[in-house]
Structures are given as structure tokens and as C-alpha cells.
Amino acid sequence: MNYDFNFDVIWRNWDLLAEGLGLGLFLAIVSIAIGCGIGLLAAFGMLSRHRTLRWIAVAYVSAIRNTPILVLILFCYFALPQMGIALDKISSFVFTLSIYAGAYLAEVFRSGLVALPKGLREAGLAIGLTEFKIKTNIIIPVMFRNVLPSLSNNFISLFKDTSLAAAIAVPELTFYARKINVESFRVIETWMVASMIYVVACYVIAALLRRLELRLAVPR
Amino acid sequence: MSPILTISGLHKSFGKVEVLKGIDLTMQQGDVVSLIGSSGSGKTTLLRCVNLLEDFEQGSIELAGQSIGYKQDGGQRRRLSEREIARQRAMTGMAFQQFNLFPHMTAIRNVMLGLIKTKKMPKDEARAIAEKWLERVGMGQRRDHYPGQLSGGQQQRVAIARAIAMNPQIMLFDEVTSALDPELVAEVLAVVRDLANEGMTMLLVTHEMRFARDVSSKVVFMHQGRIHEEGTPEQIFGAPKTERLQGFLANSEF
């Protein structure tokens, strides 16, 4: 292969890539935060005594998990406005990634909840706590610590999924990389650098989550 | 003196299996009643009905003058609201076989949680009470340890402090030494015995026959969902009347 590598165009557009990475991280963080909320509700829904709640939660999780995320993104951006729900690009993507994250995190939380010894709830009841206080003070904090390692995996996946926002022209890293590629024809350099940025970003996220894990770990 | 606890005509089923078939039991303030019997006799279920960890279908439990869990409303039996039930549960303290400490909280935070969240106490006050009770069960030095850093006996002592710090009308002990290594049983029993000597009203399910004999004012032998025989420790252990109880005691370790 005879190829003269030339990264000039990349360095010149470094600010765009940085901006794109920043937006991607922002999209991921916001969506994961909202997704955690949705996922918790759906997990409790799946384990609810009420059949309707259970049914709604299970329907939501299986519908979302069995749809490719790209299709969801396109659906929310192009089809929802036809149904009267128009969101701008970024809100639409955050909405999509949040409900997508919610479905995956629901499964993680559900298995975490099922694995808790039922004595925890009873101990809470025995000191006069209501079900709600038991959930917020005992069940969720303990479950969250237990599932943190598998959450980390999901977080990284979700961050990488922000690259799909390029499909609806959200100006994140992949969008700018494609732009640079189209304008410069430096195909190898562009996608090489974009990949590297993702790798490094994921590595840093994993390291940060690992630190969080150690910080929250209960001494034993 | 009116009794602190009155259980009358208590029936409880799990599906089609009737596990309690009409229990009547009264306790005066300061009484220590031990429930003994083979597994499946319903003794733990009975204990769990008193703080409504189990619902019951028939009969009533009255604690300190309050009907527990249900009220009669125009001839209808209604379950109380969740909030009411939570308030009533706080009138009882319970120690579990598996301790059930909150693993993400230090010993002292375990004890403080109910004081703050149920009793709405300011933190300082809750901390002072928690410290006092942890001292009392000999866990003052370990107040900042997490359950995972404590032995089973130590965890159980913290769990007892957590229950009793709520200042309950009655303490319920559900086989509190059954999950412990033999060498750790004594330290927990010593704590329970101290509480009994101080006049705490206690209802306990136990397999420790010697302990039941030493500490109880009354011993109740349960068999197949009924009270089969009851009496003072001397009567129950010294002169068991029924054949069942004689057989049960013969098979129990002393």
C-alpha cells in the first residue's frame, strides 16, 4: 500500500472534533441520567404486584430492546413530528437514547432487585418505614452498588451509541468526522483519529466508573 | 392490669395450607414468652403476625390497646392504611434470624435510620440514642463499622440495638441465634437476657431450650398451628403433660 499519511486537516479541525466529543458526552450523560430514572420505574413495574403495571413495563422493555436503535432514532425524528410531536434534533436524540437506555437499564435493575435478600425489606418494615422509604433508603442504594459493574458496560455502550446521532445531523463527533472526511478525502486519517478518540473516551469513562465503584463499595 | 398483648382466635393460611388454627395468647407488661416447637409448627408465623409481616385472615391482635392491622368497620374487616400499619409496626421491635442489617450503612447509621425516618428525630438526638444502645449491646467501639466487617454475633447485637432503639412496646425475637456459629451464640443470648432482666416485654421463637427455660416467664409449645401446651418453664420442661411435648423435648438438645 502506497499511502502518504497527512493529518494536517485533522489538526486544523481539532476544535470541531473536540466540540463533537463534548456534545456526545453531554448527550450520553443526560440520556443515561434520564434512562436510569425510567429504568428504575420500569424495573419496579416489572416486579409489581399489579398486572397492568407489569404488563406495561414488560411491553415497553421488549418493544424497545427488540428495535434497532437507529430505527428508533429515525422514527422519533421523522415519524413523531407527523404525529404532532416535534422535537429539535438534540431533544429528539436525547429522548430516543433515554428510552433506549431505560429499557436496557430496566433489565439490569430488575436483576439487581431480584437478587436482594428479602430480609432487607422486612427489616425496613419492622422499624416502621413505608414501602417508599424502604425503596429510597435501602433497596435502591444497595441494589445500585451491586449492579454498578454491569451498569458501567451499559454506560459505555450508550456513549458509543451517541455516534448514531450523526444520522439525524446532530453535530457530535461522528458527524464532524464525516464532514471532515467529505471535505478533505482524508478517509483513513479521519476515521482512524475518530476511532482513537472514542477508544480513549471509553477508557476514561470506564476508569472513572471504576473509581466510583471503589468509592461506593461497602467495606468488608 | 390490662395485658399489653392479646392474641385471640388467630387464623392464618398460606394458600390452602392453614398454618395457624386459632391461637389465643395474652402477655402482661414485662412478660417473656418463648415459643417452642418443631419447624412447621407455626411459631415463626405467629411472631410475624404480631408486626404484620404476615397478614392474617381471622382473629385479632391487640397491642397496647390498639387493634393491629385491621379494624372492624360496620361489620366489615378492613386492613388499615399502609401508613397506619407502618406506625403500628414501629410499636414492635424485631430481631431476625439473618440479622438483616442494611449493608450499605455503618452500625450506627443502621440504628439511626428508623429514629430519623420513622420517628422524625433530629440527627443529633438519633445519634445519641443510637450510641447509647450500641454501648448497651457492647458495640460502642464498632459503631462506624459496616455489617460486612462484623461477625455474625456482632451483627445480631447491632440488629437488636436497631430494634430496641425505637423504644418498642414489645420485642420480637425470631430464632436470633440459629444462624450463628456456636461460639457466638452466648454473646447474643447475654444481650437478650439483659433486656429480659430489665423488664422488656419479649416474645421469642427459639431453639435454645436451656435459654428458654432460664429467661422465660412462660413457655408456649406449638404443634401443627395450635398451642399444644403452655405453662411456666418449670411446668413445661420439668413436667411436660402431653406426649407430643415429651417427645419434642426428648429430641431437643439441652
Image (cartoon, rainbow, N blue to C red):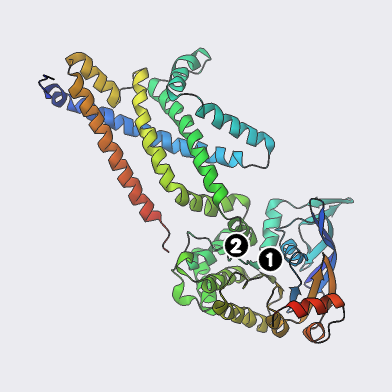
Q: Mark 2 points at which residue?
A: B119
Question: Looking at the rendering, which quadrant does residue A177 occupy?
Answer: top left
Could you tell me which secondary element the residue under label 2 belongs to?
Answer: loop
How far from the left and from the top, in percent, is residue A200?
A: 25, 37
The chain holding disc 1 is B
Q: Do labels 2 and 1 share a chain?
A: yes
Question: Looking at the rendering, which quadrant does residue B1 occupy?
Answer: bottom right
- At horizontal 37% and vertical 18% (from top left) the residue drawn is A168
How far from the left and from the top, in percent, is residue B79?
A: 77, 52
**Which is more foreground, mark 2 or mark 1?**
1
Does residue A149 show up?
Answer: yes
Q: Which amino acid is tagged 1?
A: Met
How far from the left and from the top, in percent, is residue A72?
A: 46, 22
Reply above or below: A145 against B94.
Answer: above
B113 or B236: nearer the eye?
Answer: B236
On screen, residue A199 versus residue B168, left or right, reads left
The chain holding disc 2 is B
B251 or A110: nearer the eye?
Answer: B251
- At horizontal 77% and vertical 60% (from top left) the residue drawn is B68
Q: Mark 1 points at which residue?
A: B91
